[in-house]
Image (spheres, rainbow, N blue to C red):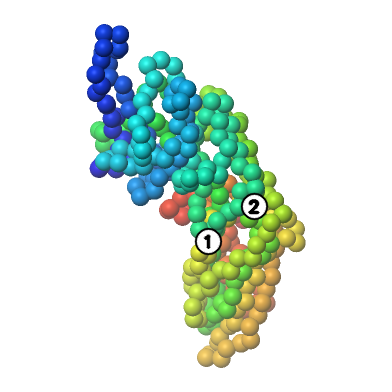
Amino acid sequence: MKKGLFFTILAGVAFASCTNNESLVPPQEIDFQVAKYLSSTRATGAEFPETESFGTYSAGLGAGKEMENTKISLSAGVWKAASGTYYWPATGTVSFISYAPYSDICPFTINASTGDVSVTDYQVDGSKDLMLADYATGLNGNVDNVSTGGTNYTGVPTLFRHMLSNISFNIGLTEAAKTAGYSVQVTGMQLSNIRNQGSITLSDIDPLAENMKPWNWPTYWTTGSNTETINIGAPSGFITDLTPATLTNCYLMPQEFEAGSQKIKISYKLKYNGIEGEVITVNKDLLGIVSGHEGWGINKKIVYNITIGVETNEITFDPAVVDWSTENTGVTIE
């Protein structure tokens, strides 16, 4: 299967017997073209994982024929319903709302007819992403939205965007500390008072967009009162340069920081000329560690580059916020 911006989606045509009262054109099976949102242009969209499935809802297929949390999977190079076969109607248009990953119990309340989506008291499972596709509407057949390398891709345009925040950490010494010959061992890292439950309602879409209408996303979810403490796996041994810390459950609830609430705690000890110092513990509010950093936004990947100095034992932060991207590049917040 050739890969491009979207997975290769070929229009599946089911040939059925026709009577004199039926159209001579065979019904067209509904297929999907799938991409995962990374930036503001589809030209850099990443492919949806071939091993995953997503759920979809439709409006316009007719009574008793709608997709209602229908599981969509890759089969023989085509993204389509995992069970049963769905066809485009002879007249009228169809709308679709899709989410990922698929669940037998959909976390959303979805109305594909009106384009309304809501989630109430969603409990984040930090090991799982949560994505929602742009509202695909006004369709009367598999569309040809993308052409890459001379190959056309057709199906229901399904462009996923991340609904959560992706958080990661790097930690090391300042240049001055490295030059002076110090190394540091991080003995513990922890996030506390992190909101892990929230609600969101989406109904406002871009009216000027064509088949793929993006939602007018808020910056954050409306978070509940539930909080949790999250341990971050610190690098092993003594280090100098920025080294990744391990946050196993990195998909966290987008939330606005509150003064004195969400915190990061770092415990470390320095070594100089073979002599190890005592463990030092520092607590910092996430709000105020750097100017302008006020929360974790929807569809944002936040990378904290944490450097430890030795003159005043002050920890400094250099968080970078980017549109969610596997390239992990972005603009540093100053």
Which mark is drawn over residue 52?
none
**Snapshot quadrant of residue 152:** top left
Q: At x 56% / y 91%, what residue is drawn?
A: 275
Describe the element under mark 2 as helix, strand or loop.
strand
Image: 157 above or below 235: above
Q: Residues within 10 Å of mark 1 (few under 14, many from 20)?
A: some
Locate residue 176 relative to residue 226 in the image: left or right: left
Q: Mark 2 points at which residue?
A: 197
Q: Do the residues labelled 1 and 2 touch (CB within 8 Å)?
A: no
Q: How far apart are marks 1 and 2 (CA)?
A: 15 Å
Q: In which quarter of the image is residue 42?
A: top left
Looking at this view, is 295 or 15 the one in front? 15
Is residue 65 at all visible to an observer of this figure?
A: yes
Image location (x, y in percent) of residue 50: 34, 47
Q: State the residue position of label 1.
A: 249
| Residue located at (45% from left, 32% from top) | 67
Position of the C terminus by quadrant: bottom right
Which residue: 52% across, 33% down? 214
Q: Which residue is drawn at 56% across and 49% down?
A: 164
**In the picture, residue 5 is in which quadrant?**
top left
